């Protein structure tokens, strides 16, 4: 497990073991946890140069910086900055998240994770602020050399 995956797991929180008679619920919870962890990794990992060229974005800092730029272009810069900063994290709604990420990116994440779009957006809206907060403990975006590698 890479550093980024470890940080995401920490941000999502440790999972307790349910009672044996809740095996089905435990499997559902584990599936959802895996889906959201995969989506967060896909959002925050640096994108290959080929993907950047395809979208016309040249972004040497990778996923976190690119994600910030998407929020900025969508008019949600203040929300993202609250996650980076040391104060209270502002919430984000699933429709706002769809706006920031763009429908194509939401489609890709849904396809990659196997999660329905609405469920995925709801879970990302819940966990993304905390993950970004933990990835930016000094209240600023990291330098290229500081980005965790998966």
Image (cartoon, rainbow, N blue to C red):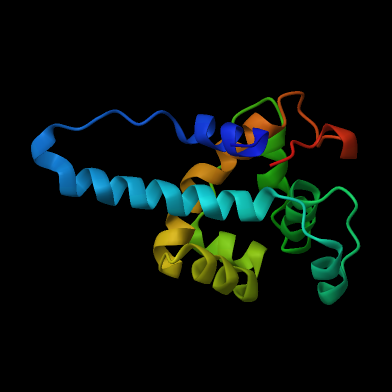
Q: Position of residue 127 (x, y in %)?
A: 50, 43
Q: Quadrant of the C terminus?
A: top right
Q: Nearer the viewer, residue 146 or 27?
A: 27
Which residue is rendered at x = 88% and y = 71% of the image?
53
Q: Nearer the viewer, residue 40 or 133?
A: 40
Which residue is rendered at x = 63% and y = 55% of the image?
42
Q: Which residue is most to the left?
A: 21
Q: Position of residue 21 (x, y in %)?
A: 8, 39
Q: Position of residue 11 (x, y in %)?
A: 53, 32
> Is residue 69 shown to the viewer in this render?
yes
Left or right of residue 133: residue 107: left
Which residue is rendered at x = 50% and y = 68% of the image?
110
Q: Which residue is most to the front?
A: 1
Q: Is residue 71 above or below residue 33?
A: below
Q: Position of residue 139 (x, y in %)?
A: 76, 28
Q: Nearer the viewer, residue 90 or 46?
A: 46
Answer with the quarter of the image where residue 145 lies.
top right
Q: Quadrant of the N terminus?
A: top right
Q: Is residue 64 above or below residue 131?
A: below
Which residue is rendered at x = 57% and y = 61% of the image?
96
């Amino acid at each position: 497990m890479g550093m980024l995956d470890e940080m995401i797991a920490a941000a999502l929180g440790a999972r307790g073991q349910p009672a044996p008679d809740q095996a089905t619920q435990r499997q559902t919870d584990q599936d959802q946890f895996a889906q959201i962890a995969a989506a967060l990794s896909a959002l925050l990992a640096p994108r290959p140069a080929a993907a950047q060229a395809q979208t016309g974005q040249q972004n040497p800092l990778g996923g976190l910086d690119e994600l910030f730029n998407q929020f900025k272009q969508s008019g949600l810069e203040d929300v993202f900055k609250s996650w980076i900063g040391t104060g209270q994290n502002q919430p984000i709604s699933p429709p706002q998240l769809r706006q920031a990420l763009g429908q194509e990116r939401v489609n890709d994440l849904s396809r990659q994770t196997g999660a329905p779009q609405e469920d995925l957006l709801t879970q990302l809206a819940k966990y993304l602020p905390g993950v970004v907060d933990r990835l930016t403990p000094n209240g600023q975006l990291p330098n290229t050399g500081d980005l965790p590698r998966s």
